[in-house]
Amino acid sequence: MKNDTIMVTGATGMLGREVLERVRRTGRPVRALTRGTALPDDAGVDWYTGDLTTGAGLDEALAGVRTVIHCASDIRHFKNDVPGLRHLLEAGKRAGVEHVVNISIVGVDRIPYPYFRVKLECERLLASSDTGWTNLRATQFPALLDLAFGALSKLPVVLVPSGTDCQPADAGEVADRLVELALGAPAGRVPDFAGPTVYPATRLAKDWLHATGKRRAVLPVRIPGRIGAAWRAGHLTTPGHALGRRTWEEYLAKRVAR
C-alpha cells in the first residue's frame, strides 16, 4: 500500500493551524509535530512530541511519513530555524520522507533583515538536500500586521516606515496552496503567493486604527540603511503574483465582527 501520510510541523502556529485543518480535509493520514509533551486529543490527527532544535523525537515522528509541510519557525529565536530544518531533513532521510514543502517569505533574497537571511539560508539548505522539495514564498499575513499595529499603537503615535508598500496574503489561502503543493510532486521553487492588493504601510495603519476604534496619528518614518532602501524599493511585494483573493479590508471586517 502506498504511504500517503502528511506531517505538519509548527502545527500549533498561525499558519500551521490553517494547514493542519486543510490536510485533515484531504482524507490522508495526518500527523502534527509539537514541542509540548501534553498532546492534544484531536480526532483524525496523530500528534507527536519532537524538538527540531535538538532533533529529539523526530525519528519516531517521521517514521512512515511521505510528505512534510514545514511551517515551524520562531521569530523570537530565529537562529534555531536552520539547525531545526537540518535536523528535520536528516531525520526525514532516515525515515524515507520523499517531499518537504517549505514556507518562506517574499523578499528574503533582497532584504538584508536578519530573520530574512535565516529564511534564505533555510531555502538554500533545502535546495541542497537529497530530499524532494518545494519552496513557496508568501507576503505578509494580515494577522501578523494586526499584531504589529497593536504593539505600535501603544505609543502616542503609530510609527510606520515611509515609502514602504505591503501586500497582505490571507493565511488560509496560503495554507490552501501549501496543501495543494504537498499533494503534488516536488516542484522546487514555485511562483510566489501574494495578496490581491498592494497598500502603502501608512494606509494599512490608518485602516487598522479606524477598524479598532483607536485614535492615534500615523507618522511615517524613513528607515535608514540597506533594509530601509529595500523596503522602499518594493521588495516586500510582488504584484505579478497577486494570487490571493481575500483583502485586508475583509480581514479587518471579520476582526471587528468577532
Image (cartoon, rainbow, N blue to C red):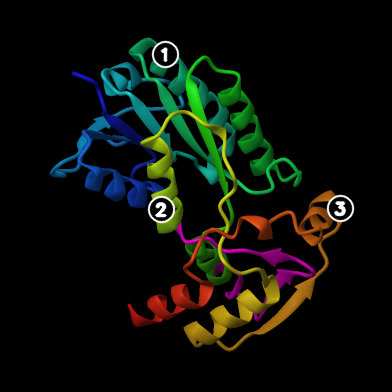
Which dot, 1 or 2, sits closer to the camera?
1
Q: Amino acid at mark 1?
A: Lys
Disc number placed over residue 93 in the picture, else none: 1
- Numbered disc total: 3
> What percent of the width, then of the height, locates residue 166?
65, 64
Displayed quadrant of residue 126: top right
- Residue at left 58%, top 81%? 207
| Separation of residues labelled 3 and 1 (CA atoms) | 41 Å
Identify the residue position indicated by label 2 in the image.
14
Identify the residue position indicated by label 3 in the image.
225
The answer to whether residue 61 is visible is yes
Displayed quadrant of residue 179: top left
- Report if residue 163 lies within the magenta region: yes
> What percent of the width, then of the height, locates residue 174?
46, 52
For the C terminus, which image quadrant? bottom left
> What percent of the width, then of the height, locates residue 76?
54, 45
Tag 3–tag 2 contact (CB < 8 Å): no
